[in-house]
Image (tube, rainbow, N blue to C red):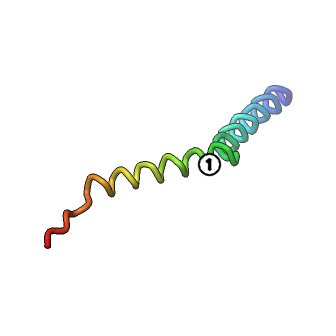
Amino acid sequence: MLLFFLVFFGLQIFVLFCCAAAGNDAASQELSDQEQLQFIAEWKKQHQKKDVC
């Protein structure tokens, strides 16, 4: 019974650790930043007011 609890909680901790670690590396963060900058640039192009003088 004790072995069951140790294995169960050990697997739970492992899954939580993997979920917390996913996507926290520098490469994925840099990719996310680039995608956000591209989105903002496109949004600004589409929503830019035309200056009429």
Vertical side of 48 occupied by 33: above or below? above
What secondary structure is found at the residue carrying circle 1? helix
- Report the residue marked by disc 1: 29
Q: Give the quadrant of residue 14.
A: top right
The location of residue 53, given as percent across then percent down, is 14, 73
Q: Position of residue 44 (x, y in %)?
A: 33, 57
Within the image, what quadrant is residue 8 found in? top right
Count of marks overlaid on the render: 1
Nearest the viewer among 45 and 14 is 45
Dot 1 crowding, Cα within 10 Å, few <14, some 14–19, many 20+ = few
Instruction: Give the residue at x 33% y 53%.
Output: 43
Q: Is residue 51 left or right of residue 38?
A: left
Tell me what residue is drawn at x 75 percent, y 39 percent. 13
At horizontal 79% and vertical 34% (from top left) the residue drawn is: 10
Q: On the picture, is 28 further left or further right than 13?
A: left
Does 42 sit left or right of 23 as displayed? left
Q: Residue at x 66, y 40 (%)?
A: 22
Viewer-proximal residue, 24 or 26? 26
Residue type pointed to by label 1: Gln
Q: Quadrant of the N terminus?
A: top right
Q: Residue furthest left?
A: 53
Residue 23 sits in which quadrant?
top right
**10 vs 36, nearest the viewer:** 36
Percent position (x, y) of residue 32?
Answer: 55, 47
The x and y percentages for residue 4 are: 80, 26
